[in-house]
């Protein structure tokens, strides 16, 4: 039997309409859209495309649900152009593909998403066939954006748990993607998933929500001590090899043996940043690639930061990402930010 290799990227597949604006408007006012860019999006799509951009020869499969519409056909064409195996990406006849208006604010660097679920609301564990995949890792997301998956499923707390249990039974390692939303909702959906994960790669707000801890200081900066403690809390709820929390200044990786590694992000100059949409997905792609290839954890973190920085060169979620060598060259060029020990 051949050894497993590659990633099965599963769950959210949508089309993003990335809209750049100068500043966030007040209600009942008008604001000019400076640029519109249509790209694929969603955690499943972004991970798949980022991995293929990092390494065109890396095996990537896609599974999820799209509509029988022009947007769904657009996603199929994008997968085909990058060599993503999308045979398990299902089509809902007559349905509308999930789509997102992603507003990127030039003056603040912040982003806000308005999403329409479309057929994503109909996605259930029955749409996930993990029995025939040759992938090594399942990347699954995102709880909170799929109505049926978010509900209890048979004897399971929700559909996400059901899929993760199927994956483990089929010999897949698993990583879960999260969506920053109300802390109580995020924790309610994701905590039942933790015992079924091998890795968790999230941001500082999300790790705090899972742990029930505040991870941001009053001035809005990340509290590194609280992030480290939250990672310990989350690891205690599962059997993960690594839990990683990223934030603008850096990231912290933690293992169940008490290991904590902090690494600053790429010191990217402001003039090189086009938008932050997709940077978290790019970080996760770099991290997951490094872990898949059995890199030392520091090397995987460095690639994750480099991939996130490369992503921010474009408004869209994936177009800025280059090859592994190209991303690491950016980290060499700009260096890493210092981070407190």
Image (cartoon, rainbow, N blue to C red):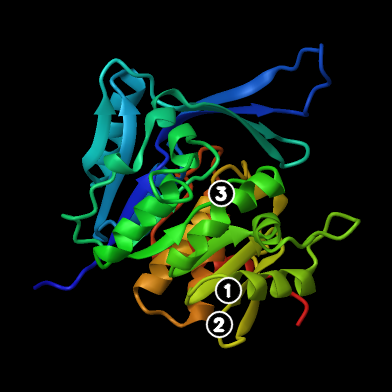
x, y (%) of residue 319?
45, 43
Left or right, 48 with reference to 320: left
The residue singled out by tag 2 in the image is 256
Q: Earlier in the sequence, mark 3 or mark 1?
A: 3
Label 2 CA crowd tier, 10 Å (few <14, some 14–19, many 20+)? some
Distance of label 2 from label 3 (alpha carbons):
22 Å
User: From where the camera sits, is residue 74 visible?
Assistant: no
Distance of label 1 from label 2 (alpha carbons):
6 Å
User: From where the camera sits, is residue 177 visible?
Assistant: yes
Q: Secondary structure at mark 1?
A: helix
Picture quadrant of residue 339: bottom right
Left or right, 294 with reference to 107: left
Q: Secondary structure at mark 3?
A: helix
Is there CB contact under 8 Å for labels 1 and 2? yes
x, y (%) of residue 26?
84, 21
Question: Viewer-proximal residue, 86 or 328?
Answer: 86
Q: Residue furthest front?
A: 155
Q: Nearer the viewer, mark 3 or mark 1?
A: 3
Q: Earlier in the sequence, mark 1 or mark 2?
A: 1
Label 3 CA crowd tier, 10 Å (few <14, some 14–19, many 20+)? many
Q: Earlier in the sequence, mark 2 or mark 3?
A: 3
x, y (%) of residue 143?
51, 45
Residue 189 has which mark?
3
Residue 235 has which mark?
1
Picture quadrant of residue 191: bottom right
Residue at screen point 46% across, 45% down:
43
x, y (%) of residue 30?
77, 12
Label 1 CA crowd tier, 10 Å (few <14, some 14–19, many 20+)? many
């Amino acid at each position: 039997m051949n050894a497993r290799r590659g990633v099965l990227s599963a769950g959210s597949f949508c089309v993003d309409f990335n809209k750049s604006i100068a500043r966030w408007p007040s209600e009942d006012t008008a604001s000019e859209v400076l640029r519109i860019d249509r790209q694929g999006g969603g955690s499943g799509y972004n991970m798949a495309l980022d991995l293929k951009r990092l390494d065109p020869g890396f095996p990537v499969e896609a599974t999820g649900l799209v509509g029988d519409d022009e947007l769904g056909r657009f996603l199929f064409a994008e997968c085909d152009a990058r060599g993503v195996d999308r045979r398990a990406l299902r089509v809902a006849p007559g349905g509308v593909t999930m789509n997102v208006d992603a507003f990127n604010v030039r003056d603040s660097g912040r982003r806000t998403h308005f999403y329409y679920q479309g057929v994503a609301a109909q996605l259930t564990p029955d749409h996930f066939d993990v029995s025939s995949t040759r992938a090594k890792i399942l990347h699954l997301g995102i709880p909170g954006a799929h109505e049926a998956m978010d509900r209890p499923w048979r004897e399971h707390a929700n559909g996400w748990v059901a899929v993760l249990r199927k994956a483990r039974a089929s010999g897949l390692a698993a990583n879960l993607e999260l969506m920053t939303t109300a802390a109580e909702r995020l924790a309610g959906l994701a905590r039942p998933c933790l015992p079924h994960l091998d890795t968790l790669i999230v941001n500082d707000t999300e790790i705090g929500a899972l742990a029930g801890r505040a991870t941001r200081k009053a001035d809005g900066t990340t509290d590194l001590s609280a992030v480290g403690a939250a990672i310990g809390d989350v690891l205690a709820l599962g059997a993960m090899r690594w839990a990683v929390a990223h934030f603008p200044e850096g990231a912290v990786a933690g293992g169940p043996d008490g290991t904590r590694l902090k690494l600053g992000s790429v010191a990217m100059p402001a003039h090189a940043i086009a938008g932050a949409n997709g940077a978290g997905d790019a970080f996760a792609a770099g991290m997951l690639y490094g872990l898949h290839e059995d890199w030392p954890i520091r090397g995987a973190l460095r690639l994750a930061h480099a991939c996130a920085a490369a992503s921010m060169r474009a408004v869209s979620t994936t177009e800025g990402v280059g090859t592994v060598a190209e991303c690491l060259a950016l980290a060499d060029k700009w260096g890493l930010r210092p981070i407190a020990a």
